[in-house]
C-alpha cells in the first residue's frame, strides 16, 4: 500500500547577503539559508524558519514532501534536493530546493516499511530480516508515495519478498532490480532450514557442541 504525498506550504524570505558569516548569523536567529533553483528560474537565495522547515520535513511525506514555497510575492512548487547538516549537532545548516512541474517525472527514494505479524515465522522461532530500507522510484511530484508498506504476515520460514513482488499504485515506476531482496525469514540456524535440518550434525554425537552453536550464530549474522 502506498500513501500519497500532500502539498505543504512554507514561507521563505529572499536574502541578499551570502557567505559563511551571514549563514552563521541566520542560523543563530533560527533561520536556515538555502537556494531555490531549476524550472527555468534564476537561482534565488532564501532563508526559511528552522521550525517551519522541520515541521514540513517531518510530516508523513518526509524528505520527499512537495512544498509550495512563497517568496517575494511568488510561489514555487519545489522538492528538497539536498540537506546539509552540522556534522556534530546534526541540525540542518543549508537546504537546496528544486523547482518542479506537477506533470514532471522526477526521481526519489521512499522508505520501505514492513507491516503485519509473521505468524508462521514467529511460531517457528525465526525472525524477519529487512534488507532494503529505501526504494528508488520515478513519478510526478504529486504521485510520489510517502512510503511503501510491505506486508509480511504471510511470509513463511525461509521465504523472501523481492522488489519484483511490489505493486505500486498510479504511474509510479520502480528504479531497482526486481531480484533485490526486501525481507527474508530466517530460522534459528539460518535461512530456509526445515525443522531438524540443522540438528543432524549435533545429533550424530560428533564434534564439539559449542562449535556447532558458534557456526549457527555466524550463519545467522551473515544473512
Image: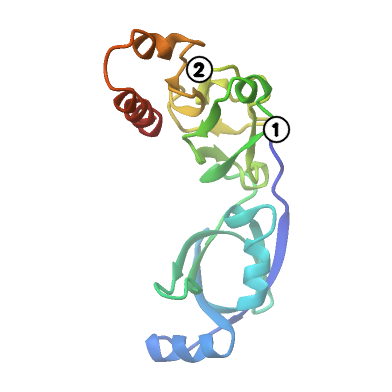
Q: Residue furthest left?
A: 207
Q: Which residue is mark 1?
A: 1
The x and y percentages for residue 85 are: 45, 70
**Residue in the picture at 34% in, 11% down:** 201
Q: Looking at the image, is 30 positioned above or below residue 67?
A: below
Nearer mark to the viewer, of 2 and 1 = 2
Report crowding for label 2: few under 14, some 14 to 19, many 20 or more residues within 10 A (C-alpha). Answer: some
Q: From where the camera sits, is residue 43 visible?
A: no
Going from N to C along the chain, the mark reached first, 2 or 1, is 1
**Viewer-closest of 150 and 125:** 125
**Relative height, residue 215 to residue 200 (above, below):** below
Instruction: Using the image as rendered, state which of residue 91 and residue 222 is in the foreground.
Output: 222
**Residue located beneath label 2 in the image:** 158
Q: Position of residue 212 (x, y in %)?
A: 33, 23
Residue at point 37%, 25% (across, down): 216
Q: Residue at x 42, y 86 (%)?
A: 18
Kind of element beneath mark 1: loop
**SS at circle 2:** loop
Displayed quadrant of residue 58: bottom right
Quarter where residue 75 is shown: bottom right
- Residue at 52% across / 38% down in the picture? 137
Asked whether the beta carbons under mark 2 and mark 1 sit within 8 Å of each other, the answer is: no
The image quadrant where one finds the C terminus is top left
Q: Is residue 119 visible?
A: yes
Q: Position of residue 179 (x, y in %)?
A: 43, 21
Disc 1: CA contacts within 10 A as few (<14), some (14-19) or many (>=20): few
Q: Which mark is residue 124?
A: none
**By what rule are the colours in the image chosen?**
rainbow
Marks 2 and 1, how far apart at CA: 24 Å
Image location of residue 68, percent across then percent down: 68, 63
Amino acid at each position: 500500500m502506498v500513501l500519497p504525498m500532500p502539498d505543504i506550504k512554507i514561507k521563505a524570505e529572499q536574502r541578499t547577503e551570502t557567505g559563511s558569516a551571514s549563514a552563521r548569523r541566520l542560523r543563530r536567529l533560527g533561520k536556515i539559508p538555502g537556494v531555490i533553483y531549476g524550472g527555468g528560474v534564476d537561482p534565488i537565495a532564501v532563508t526559511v524558519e528552522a521550525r517551519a522547515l522541520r515541521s514540513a520535513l517531518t510530516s508523513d511525506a518526509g524528505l520527499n514532501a512537495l512544498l509550495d514555497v512563497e517568496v517575494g510575492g511568488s510561489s514555487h512548487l519545489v522538492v528538497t534536493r539536498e540537506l546539509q547538516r552540522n556534522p556534530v549537532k546534526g541540525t540542518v545548516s543549508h537546504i537546496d530546493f528544486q523547482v518542479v512541474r506537477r506533470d514532471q517525472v522526477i526521481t526519489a527514494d521512499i522508505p520501505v516499511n514492513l507491516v503485519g505479524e509473521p505468524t508462521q515465522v514467529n511460531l517457528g522461532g525465526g525472525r524477519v530480516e529487512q534488507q532494503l530500507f529505501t526504494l528508488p522510484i520515478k513519478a510526478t511530484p504529486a504521485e510520489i508515495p510517502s512510503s511503501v508498506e510491505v506486508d509480511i504476515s504471510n511470509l513463511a520460514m525461509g521465504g523472501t519478498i523481492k522488489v519484483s513482488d511490489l505493486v505500486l499504485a498510479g504511474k509510479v515506476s520502480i528504479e531497482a532490480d526486481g531480484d533485490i531482496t526486501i525481507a527474508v525469514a530466517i530460522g534459528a540456524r539460518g535461512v530456509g532450514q526445515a525443522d531438524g535440518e540443522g540438528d543432524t550434525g549435533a545429533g550424530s554425537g560428533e564434534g564439539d557442541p559449542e562449535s556447532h552453536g558458534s557456526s549457527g550464530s555466524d550463519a545467522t549474522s551473515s544473512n
